[in-house]
Structure formats: structure tokens, C-alpha cells
Image (cartoon, rainbow, N blue to C red):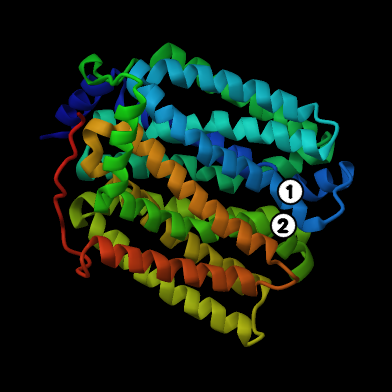
Amino acid sequence: MNSLDTNISDRAAHGLGFGEFVALMAALMAVNALSIDIMLPALSIIGRDLDVAVENHQQLVIAVYLGSFGIGQLFYGPLADRYGRRSILLMSMLVYSLMSFMAALAGSFEMLLLARAFQGMAAASTRVLSTSIIRDCYSGRRMARVMSLAFMVFLSVPVLAPTMGQLMLLVMPWHWIFYFLSGFSLLVMLWAGIRLPETLDPARRLPINIGAIGAAAMKVVTNRYSIGYALASSCAFGGMIGMLNSFPQIIEHVFHAPELFALCFAFMGGMMALSALINSRIVERLGTRLVSHSALIAFILLCVVKLTVVLSGGESLFSFTVLSGLTFFLIGLIGSNFGSMAMEPMGDLAGTASSVQGFLGMMVSTGIGLAIGQSFAGSTVPLTLGWLLSGLTALAITLWVERGKLFRPQNPRPVLSA
């Protein structure tokens, strides 16, 4: 099939040009990324302004959002499988915008955390629906390529967002970060409302039935590929969430260079975006397993190197940033491919599968990240050790999924809905 034929078939699947479709999916994912990354430079300011007594508690602005984001994913899958993707997406983006506005007006830390909780619940739709919409239109290595391209655009957010946050803080109070998030979500809602058609075939809509939902969820959690790769991916991402939680304190208290926050974080985010670009170019040729399994092993070896450098006392801001950037690069190769492999046998249960996988994955990764972040006591040892342990756990789960045989292509049997 030539490139023109590919473009025609891609457009027929969802009514958009391939580039616009990828850009819209990336924008949906970016709503969640912005909710985290743009406010990282503001955590200490928020803590002082709202009288947060324990410095590590500032991390709850991130952790509460992520926990609610995970819980919210349980609901959007069944709703999207029943009512379709488009209407649920538009409603959730409106709620997200309102909760962002509420966060901007918060007068206490407790009210801010409450607004963040509801904001995370609304933003959970972006993860479930973007994955479900992509799965409605693509499968296999083609799906992995689309997800990689969307991730590549979406992962530019960590490169730009902290700088945006710092620049905003130079001329306005932290509240305006939330006003910006409110406006951005409204723009995404308008784009989807005008351009995105419904991608769920009416014949595949499932009624909201507790018994049926439970049965579908059971199929998701009992399928070795589905649950295994979802959990393995969450372990790898747990260390990254630990980095998000503790990075502002690490850059300020360990390396005493808060002015370099945005530059260092941009490098790490850029490495993750680069990995998504490379993955999009090689995954259809090499396969998801060869790429992701190799990246996972390299991730573990790199964590051993990082831990050696830290314990030897030879760590500097430069070595920390470079090695962390390489770690982010490998997480990028692991995450998109593990996500695709987890969804591959779930074609007829895409919405429910995305919800269950997202909920379990986010609970695990948030728990790992919170444990790492709350362990911060003036060094990078908890972060580095946590990354290594999460990588080893991901490898153990992957070996279980593949019955001890890595790298080999597999064709898991699709799970059919009732």
C-alpha cells in the first residue's frame, strides 16, 4: 500500500486526516501532562502561600491529582462503551475546566486539594478515551505507531510546561496557572466538538449493566497480556512519578540550583519525546516486544549505574540530569509499547479495558511515586533505588507474561465481549 492509500484509509477510519487525528489525541493527553508539569515550579510558592507546614506535603498537589486520575478511569470506560466516546469527552472537558477555575480561587490548601481531586477525576477521561479512540481505529503495530506519534507530540509538554510555569510566575500569581489550564481544556473541547466524529460503532455499544461490567473487567484482569503489561508499565512509570514529586526539592536542596529547574526538566522531557519519535520509526519494523523488552533491560542496567554513581558520592547536577534523561528515554520506549500490547487482545472491550488497566496502573504507579517522594530527605538515594526496584519488578512481571521468553513476537487471542 502506498502512502496515498494509507492516508485515504486512515481518513476513512475516523473522518480526519492522519496528522490532525494524531494531533488531537496528543492534545487530549497534553491536558493531563499540563496538569502536572506546568505547576511543578509553583509547588513551593503554593506551599508558602497556603501555609503548608511540612514541605513534603507540597507533593500532595501532584499525588492527589494522580490518585483521583486513576480512580476516575474506572467510570469512563463503561460510560464510553455505552454512550460513545465523543459525548463523554466533551462533558468531562467542561467539568475539568470548571474544576481548574475552582482551584484558582482556592483560599486554603484543603480546598486546593479538593479541586485537584475533582480535576483529576475529570482528566481521567483523556487517558481512557484517547486510548479507546485510537483502538477503535487501529490495532497491532499500526496502533503502536499512532500512540508513539501522539506521545511524541504530547511529551513535548514536559519540555515546555515548566518554563511556561516559571514565566507565568514572574508576572502573575500561581492562581493564573489554573486559569490557563481551564482555558486550554475548553479549546480542546471545542476542537473535538467541531472535528471529531463518534468512533465507536453503534453495534459495539454495551449496556451499563453491573454484572456485564464486572464480567468484562474480570476478562481484563484475568488476561495475562492485558493485566501483565498494564502492571509492568505502571512499575516503570512509578519511578517517573517519584521524580515528578521530588524533583523541585532535589533541584533546590540537593543541587542548590532552582534557577536551572526548567532547563534540566526540559532535557529529561525532551529525551522522552525523542524516544517516542524513534519508536514510531522502528516499532512496525522491529516489533513491540523486541523494542520494549530491550529497553526494559537497558533501564535496569542504567539504574544500577545511577545508584553506583550516587553511592560513590560522585553525583553532580550534570550527571543526575543526563542519567535521568536517559532513564526517561527508556521509559518512553517501554510505556507506549507495553500499553499497546496490553490493549491488543481487548479489541471488543477497549473502553472497559482502558479503564481497568488505567485504574490499576495509576494506583500502582502513584503509590510507588508517593512512596519515593515522601522518602526524600536531602539526597537522590530514594529516587534512584526506587527506580531500580520498580524496573526489576516490571521485568519479573514481563517474564511471567511471556512465560520466560522475551523478544519473541506473539499473537494473543482477542477477548470477545459477551
- The kind of secondary structure element at disc 1 is helix
Above/below status of 342 relative to 417: below
Q: Nearer the viewer, residue 194 or 337?
A: 337
* Disc 1 to disc 2, C-alpha distance: 7 Å
Say which mark, if any, is on residue 41: 1
Mark 2 lies on residue: 248
Q: Residue at x 50, y 80 (%)?
A: 305
Q: Position of residue 69 (x, y in %)?
A: 55, 38
Q: Nearer the viewer, residue 382 or 24?
A: 382
Question: Are the residues flagged by discs 1 and 2 in contact, CB closer than 8 Å?
Answer: yes
Evaluate whether residue 257 shows in this view: yes
Give the mark, 1 or 2, whose residue is nearer the N terminus. 1
Q: Nearer the viewer, residue 124 or 187?
A: 124
Callout 1 environment at 10 Å: few (<14), some (14 to 19), or many (20+)?
many
Q: Position of residue 173 (x, y in %)?
A: 83, 35
Q: Nearer the viewer, residue 260 or 221?
A: 221
Q: The residue under label 1 is which amino acid type?
A: Pro
